[in-house]
Each structure stands twice: as structure tokens, then as C-alpha cells.
Image (tube, rainbow, N blue to C red):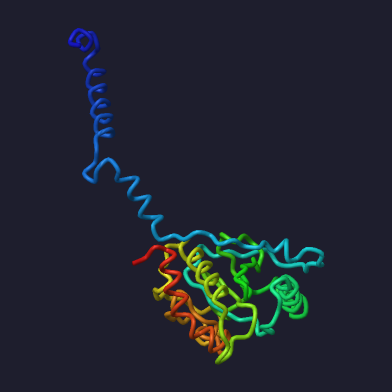
Amino acid sequence: MRRVWCCVPGALVLGLLVLAAVLIDRSAPSDAGPGAGTAARAAARVHTAAQPRIVRREQWLAGMDTYERDPVRYADRVVAVFIHHTDSPNGYDCADSPRIIRYIYAGQAGSKEWDDIGYNFLVDRCGTVFEGRAGGVGRAVVGAHTQGFNGKTAGIAAIGTFGKGVQVPRAMADSIAALAAWKLGLSGVDPRSTVRLKSTNSLSRFEKGTSADFRAISGHRDGYETYCPGEALMAELPAIRARAARLQNRP
């Protein structure tokens, strides 16, 4: 080994020694241990939840003329979800859910001339989850569901009317929890936490530019003067938050 080094010019020897030191340093275990990188990645994933099965909009739109709409707008992430009800009859057959969604779509994007259906997702009484607004289920699509607070939020609509005394189907509540757990988990948000949002419209319950605190899973009425999503569904939200947190593997 000495004969090799003695045949190399001094400056080059110094350079090789520095390079060797760097390589040794990079290969040596850190103070956090050899599995630190893996542990960090695992920690980042520990509070995510699986994506539930989602019926794509192309399926419920099949055979229907669609309306021209503005380009999809995106936020950087979703930090809260607002729960709605569609204020429509409850006694439907779940096979009719696509027809009901088409009716809602025609009313919002057609009669009201919105740029698309307002809700990001809809859930029927059997627990089937449907993609609502276009733009990609895994992306932070800006909807038209909660006046003043559409950015950085997702709107989930329960198909039906859930006033006081109405039973919320367990399959529906479970799917709302699973959907919220997955969607919030993409941003690392605890479904039981409180988040701060800034109003973008004075027609909301808060003047434009005003910041307000919301539960990560809130009801429509928390951000807008409305009866939606009904007393029964509002009463179910604490349980939905708890289920969503469990699905994110939170203690």
C-alpha cells in the first residue's frame, strides 16, 4: 500500500485522502442508527389511511350530456372536510344513486350554471362513495360546497336528508369516516384536530379575510348559515372523527 501512495504526486494523495474520508463518513452509521431513514419514512406514513373504493364520475355520468366548465382549480393540500347532506329523499334504492347524483349535477352545473357539481364526493345510504367534482380524487380540488371556505377543503355530501331524529345509516357514516381519514391523511391532518382557515367570501359566517378555527371534520353550518347537514348528521360527527382517527392509526 505504501508503494502505491509513494508513486502518486503529493497533491493528488491529499485529494484521494479527502475523498476516502468522505466515502467512509457517508457509509458509517449515523447517531440515529442505520435504520433512521426507513424509520423516518415509516413515521411519515403511520398516520395515513387507505383510500376507500370510489366510483368515478365517468360511471355515474354515463349516457348524460355534460356541461362546459371552467378549468379545474387546485389548492396546495386539503386540511379540512365539510360534511353536507343533499336535502333529498332518504328512501331510495342504492342502485338509483347514480341517477340521483346526475339530478344534483344537472341542478348545480345546469340550472344554477355552476362550473361543475359542487361536492368533491358523495356517499349513499349503502356506503358507496362517488367522485363528484372533476379534477382527480387524490388532488386538492377546489369545490363549490362551503361559501368562503372551498380552498384547502373537501366537501363530502351524504345523499339524503338528516334532520333531527333521522337515523344516519352506519354504512354511510363508516364510509364518510374512511373517506375523511384518507383525504386528511394525505396532508398529515388528525381528523380530531382544529385547523385555521381564512374566509374568502363575506357571504360566509365570517367576513372576507377573517381567520376562523374549525374542526378538521366540520359540518357545512360551521362555515355558512344553513341547516345543512342536519341535526342527525351533526350529532354523528364526533363519532366520525373518532373512527377516522382510528383508521389513521392514531392513539
- Classify the position of the C terminus by image quarter: bottom left
Front residue of 6 and 53 = 53
Residue 194: quarter of image: bottom left
Q: Residue furthest left?
A: 2
Residue found at x 67% / y 61% = 56
Vertically, is 6 above or below 237?
above
Vertically, is 3 above or below 215?
above
Marker count (numbered): 0
Residue 68 seen in this snapshot: yes
- Image location of residue 165, percent across then percent down: 55, 91
Residue found at x 58% / y 64% = 74
Residue 61: quarter of image: bottom right
Residue 203 seen in this snapshot: no
Vertically, is 200 above or below 138?
below
- Image location of residue 32, percent across then percent down: 24, 46
- Image location of residue 131, percent across then percent down: 64, 66
- Classify the position of the N terminus by image quarter: top left
Residue 35: quarter of image: top left
